[in-house]
Image (cartoon, rainbow, N blue to C red):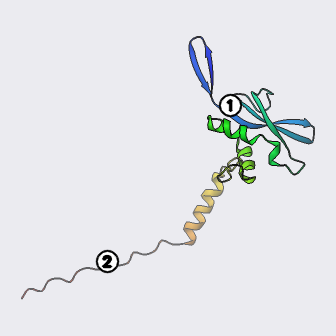
């Protein structure tokens, strides 16, 4: 976390380790950078360069300073989802891969139509008669 002071107000910002795109058009390469979470990925601002990643070649773990990444993670820096998945895939860190794709929102019309079809196709099961105790015999 980085401490910023402006007019006697102390604000804590979270540090992120993320990919920052560099390279030419249709030839993407990425820097692995430590940056403030408030900086956008295209801002060009970063605190420390931790390595690089090229999508066009088979990448090696040695391209990234793994020790520095682990050190900053221990200090509280968070990984971006894409970088987390890459490091898990390379077995640098433990864990499961996370979904980096945007969540799909269901279309309400299709959901209501599908729900209506399933309710029409399967009728409600009839209730089974409840077992009652036999009436006591009075002699």
Q: Residue at x 22, y 81 (%)?
A: 133
Q: Position of residue 75 (x, y in %)?
A: 62, 34
Q: Quadrant of residue 129?
A: bottom left
Crowding near the residue tagged with mark 1, few <14, some 14–19, many ≥20 C-alpha atoms within 10 Å: some
Q: Quadrant of residue 72?
A: top right
Q: Position of residue 26 (x, y in %)?
A: 92, 42
Q: CA distance from mark 2 to mark 1?
A: 62 Å
Q: Residue at x 56, y 12 (%)?
A: 8
The N terminus, quarter of image: top right
Sequence-wise, the earlier of marks 2 and 1 is: 1
Q: Nearer the viewer, residue 5 or 40?
A: 5
The C terminus, quarter of image: bottom left
Question: Circles 2 and 1: CB distance less than 8 Å?
Answer: no
**Residue lying farthest to the top in this orientation:** 7
Q: Is 33 displayed left or right of 26 in the figure?
A: left
Q: Is 36 displayed left or right of 54 in the figure?
A: left
**Residue lying farthest to the bottom in this orientation:** 139
Q: Is 31 displayed left or right of 138 in the figure?
A: right
User: Mark on residue 130?
Assistant: 2
Q: Which residue is mark 1?
A: 37
Q: Quadrant of residue 43?
A: top right
Q: Residue at x 20, y 83 (%)?
A: 134
In this rendering, the label closer to the viewer, 2 or 1: 1
Q: Nearer the viewer, residue 78 or 41?
A: 78
Q: Nearer the viewer, residue 119 or 105?
A: 105
Q: Position of residue 82 (x, y in %)?
A: 74, 45
SS for dot 1:
loop
Q: Is residue 128 above or below residue 2?
A: below
SS for dot 2:
loop
């Amino acid at each position: 976390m980085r401490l910023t002071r402006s007019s006697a107000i102390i604000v804590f910002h979270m540090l992120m380790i993320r990919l920052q795109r560099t390279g030419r058009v249709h030839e993407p390469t990425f820097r692995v950078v430590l940056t403030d979470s408030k900086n956008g990925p295209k801002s060009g601002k970063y605190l420390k360069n931790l390595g690089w990643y090229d999508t066009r070649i088979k990448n090696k773990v040695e391209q990234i300073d793994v020790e520095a990444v682990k050190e900053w993670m221990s200090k509280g820096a968070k990984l971006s989802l894409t970088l987390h998945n890459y490091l898990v895939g390379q077995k640098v860190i433990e864990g499961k891969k996370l979904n980096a794709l945007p969540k799909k929102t269901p279309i309400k019309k299709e959901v209501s139509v599908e729900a209506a079809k399933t309710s029409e196709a399967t009728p409600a099961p009839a209730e089974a008669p409840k077992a009652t105790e036999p009436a006591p015999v009075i002699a």
